[in-house]
Amino acid sequence: MKTGILGSFSRKLVLQSALAGLLFHTAVSGGATIVTQISAGFNHSLFIESDGSLWGMGNNISGQLGDGTTAQEQDFPVLIVASNVMAASAGISHSCFVTSNQVLWGMGANSSGQLALGALYSTNIPIPLASNVVAVSCGGQHTLFVKSDGSLWGMGDNTEGQLGTGNYTSSTNMPVEILASNVVSVSAGNVTSLFLKSDGSLWSMGYNGGGQLGIGSTILKTNTPQEVQSGATFAFSCGEGSHCLFVVLPGIGRMSAMGSDFFGQLGDGKSGTNSYSSEFIVPTDVSAVAAGGDHSAFIKTDGSLWAMGRNEWGQLGNCTGIGTNRPVQVLSSGVVAVSAGGNFNLFIKSDGTLWGMGADDIGQLGIGRTGDLSCVPIRIIPPLAVEITSTTAAQTNLLLHGTNDFAPGVFHVLMSTNLATPFNQWTPFSTNVAGSPSFNIIVTNGVDLNSAAQRFFRLQLFQIN
């Protein structure tokens, strides 16, 4: 029986499998699977493998996974394009990717012209949108991209000035040029946009209700680009909510944040306030940042992963359900890339494995557990190979015997007395180390399983190095 186990304890033990479908991806990929790029949208995800194939999972009601369907969700990774994909971006309900010949493709919602198809219809298959494209970012209902000549382009909703065109007219029929040259990368938030110039300066435009433009002004919005940082910027991210992060000084790695801090997502120790000017959060050693819905994540140069902000879905990688206004360490080493979604995170480790934590209520983690979450980091690609071979319920102990494909690892246990209670409200109460290739662990409940009222347990397995 595979991991992702739900146990109901009254007079007898019942176990249900939840992850068997993950074996499909390993079979179709063939051999070693190396994930090279990730993009976490609001509640869907995209990732690219070393062979140039593009995969997606999660919400697909607008066709944003581009798999030819509009299934409400895809709980396991589905193949979108088999090869030659070099970059991808997941927005709220649309997606874009760039192929090796620099063609920009898009799929999903187009209600505001974010795909610039001419007519406001959605598509569940990739449609070519532009040529000579080298970078793209999908926001709420707008899209930004950079061409090989350094020009910046946008399409879709512009009611908050997020296209930076000097007006508030949306671009629904075709992409509109914003700047003619010197742009190298972009990050589109919900209704806010950031872009980086070749001189290292960082610029913003769009909605500023939470201060996410970082320009030191309480102006509600602006339709022209405003300078945030004069130079030396090398990493930045605009979230699905109302905050943004950036890193300056290559080799030093000073991280700054701006915008809404209601849930502590800026990591400045305050919470409940807005920051209209960028403020220093981490003085050194930050190499990558990711702004999500109401949470943030970043990587340090030692490969450690950190997070702050909202946490009721486990998006900070722990099962307390309690957010924090200071960065907390999730993993101590080995992380090379991170992307923050609405209420979840994806990250890649140095061995090319794909991991996630947080909400999986619509399949955005791709681990096959509809309506679920993972409040600890869980390996997505390749899926964990775990077999529970026998179980015994005796007094206050649950004995588990089985095999797994890594060492060391941990069984994390969540408990509830009501099966209908959402998993993010279950109580964590025990962890047990499991070795490889076989394990024998004891979960101590503290309540006599033979006489207690019905109780439910969720066992999550995760790798700790």
Image: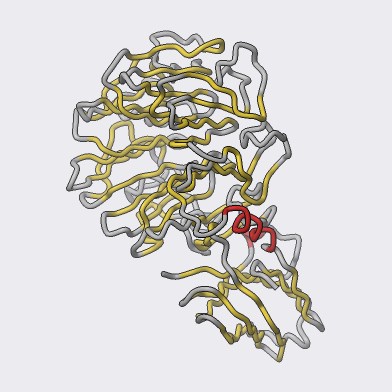
User: Which residue is pictured at 52% across the width and 61% down the height?
Assistant: 379
Would you identify the image quadrant in which residue 210 lies?
top left
User: Which residue is pictured at 33% across the width and 59% down the height?
Assistant: 304
Query: Which of the two residues, 352 or 261, is positioned nearer the viewer here?
Result: 352
Instruction: Locate the N terminus and report the quarter of the image it occupies.
Output: bottom right
Q: Where is residue 190 drawn, in percent x and y?
A: 49, 30
How many marks the image carries: the answer is 0
Query: Which of the two residues, 180 or 442, is positioned nearer the viewer here?
Result: 180
Query: Which of the two residues, 122 or 296, is positioned nearer the viewer here?
Result: 122
User: Which residue is pictured at 43% across the width and 8% down the height?
Assistant: 167
Q: Where is residue 154 drawn, in percent x and y?
A: 45, 18
Answer above or below: position of 431 versus 249: below
Q: In the displayed structure, does residue 441 sit left or right of residue 36?
A: right
Instruction: Locate the C terminus and report the quarter of the image it occupies.
Output: bottom left
Q: Where is residue 277 drawn, in percent x and y?
A: 28, 32
Query: Which of the two residues, 161 or 27, is positioned nearer the viewer here?
Result: 27
User: Which residue is pictured at 70% across the width and 84% down the height?
Assistant: 390
Would you identify the image quadrant in which residue 153 lies?
top left
Q: Where is residue 392 drawn, in percent x and y?
A: 71, 87
Which residue, as the protein is rendered here, is positioned at the far bottom? 395
Q: In the displayed structure, does residue 106 sit left or right of residue 160?
A: right
Answer above or below: position of 421 versus 456: above
